Image (cartoon, grey):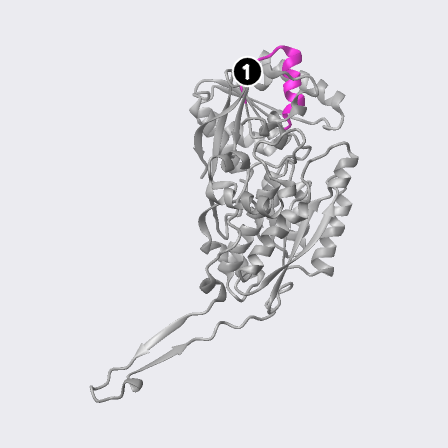
Amino acid sequence: MGTSRVRSAGLLFAVLALVAAACGDDDSATESGATTTTTTTAVDDTTAPDDTASTTTEAPPELTASDRGVSEDSIKLGIVLFDTDAILELGVDVGYGDHAQHYQVVIDEMNEAGGILGRQIEPIYKFVSPVDPEEADRVCTELTQDDEVFAVLGTARPPENVLCYTETADTPFIGAPTGDLAEAVFERSLVPFLFPGRVPSRTDGAILAAMELDGAVEGAVLAVHGADADRIEGLAAELEARGAAKVVTSVELADEADQTALATELDRVIERFKADEVEGVINLGNNVAFMAAFNRAAYRIPIWTTSPDVLADFIYDQGATNDEVSLARLVLSETSGELYDSGHEPTVECVDRWNTARPDELALSDPGEDDLSNLGQVVLACSGLDIFSRAATAAGVDLTVETFTAGLDDVGSFETAGLRFASLSSTKWDASDSARLFRWDDAEADFVGAEALEVG
């Protein structure tokens, strides 16, 4: 994963996974919606040539103001981004640069190519502090009631803020919230919440697949730890069904903001693991304090996790060392940097577009100390706009929330920036269909990608 793994994942609000984007269809015939048909009438040989055939051309479907935020010539999209100045006041420089331009560069190219079926995209940008939920609710009200956008792209923290759009305001949301994303956010959404990652249940399936690749389940004593009791119990049941001898569960109750209380709680959890002779653990939450507790107890067992915080410098802040970090088995999507370096065409197209437009803020797969850590955010912008474009194009010229939802069945499988394999439908709103297992390599002093994991 190289140096970039620390820079890209060392953000306070790291978003992994990443995600997709071919960012619009260049086929002008498809985007215009026009079709041409030719009818030939049989005649005898004496008929004049001009009378032998007639050609008719159907007029393009009429564009109308089909829904809120959709006019004859435009589609209003809200773009919600973190207020990086507010994050900087917390002492963290996320290194995003001109965040809004990540979206605007793509939108400009899409509009120059004809927009979406002839409609231009009209973005309305809003910036919110990730630690101010009241501001997030205010922005939701402004976009849905005052600005009357059709859909919203971007991010939210916590993920439950998405429900202001998808449960309350009848407004599709396309993006990657930060924090623990519960299945309930999808279940409660009444209109599409299109997520470039995976819902927890499918991510849990990838964890189980990784453990079985390691031969770590059959006959083993295992543990599952985290804050989501329902998810913990579901994984425990799956492990037992797959042959685990015993599964110990622990639910994290302490507030993560109270590091002393959290450390005390985790020390008790580790002592219980030792008493039960646990041989491996799935950690569904924050690894920073968890690995620090392993260090204090001099306890060494494999840890399966999907959290990218293992890759960040701040994993060491509470006392973890490389001895604990090397225990991790990471079940992750390939990073945007890895996809770019491997020559993944949609990712390369997305990043190169940005670097050509903004050479003053280059997105680099292996940034140096003085460079921005913006490549992942550039790819997220591409992915969100591409996913929206695919769904809106499938909906047709009569764009409404209903046709947008139904059109997802015609999106199907696709490959896009940040994702080698993705798919969407009216009942599947999380796009990612693949993951990889990364293990620590002592020689490389880094995590090295191993087997690809199929996520159904």
Residue 323: which quarter of the image? Answer: top right
Question: Which of the two residues, 376 or 65, is positioned nearer the viewer here?
Answer: 376
Count every numbered label the image shows and give the total. Answer: 1
What residue sits 44% from the left and 22% below the top? 214
> What residue is shown at x 54% (from left), y 67% (from top)?
398
Which quarter of the picture shows residue 452? top left
Please say whether residue 34 is one of the residues in the magenta stretch: no
At label 1, the amino acid type is: Ile
Q: Nearer the viewer, residue 17 or 217?
A: 17
Q: Which residues are magenta?
A: 284-303
Question: Is 66 rendered above or below residue 83?
Answer: below
Whether residue 163 sits left or right of residue 39 in the image: it is right
**Residue farthest to the right, as pictured:** 89
Q: Residue furthest left?
A: 45
Q: Residue at x 76, y 20 (%)?
A: 260
* Residue nearest the observer in this picture, 247 or 51: 51
Mark 1 surroundings: few (<14), some (14-19) or many (≥20) residues within 10 A? some
Q: Quadrant of the N terminus?
A: top right
Outermost residue, top direction?
298
| Residue on which disc 1 sits | 301
Q: Secondary structure at mark 1?
A: loop
Q: In the image, residue 190 lies at what x, y percent?
A: 60, 53
Q: Is residue 432 something that shows in the picture?
A: no
Q: State which quarter of the image contains the C terminus.
A: top left
Task: Using the image, determine if residue 40 lies above or below residue 421.
Answer: below
Report x, y in % for residue 432. 50, 41
> Visible in this render: residue 69?
yes
Q: Nearer the viewer, residue 184 or 70?
A: 70
Expressed as whole percent of the image width and height from the top left, the position of residue 140 reads 71, 52
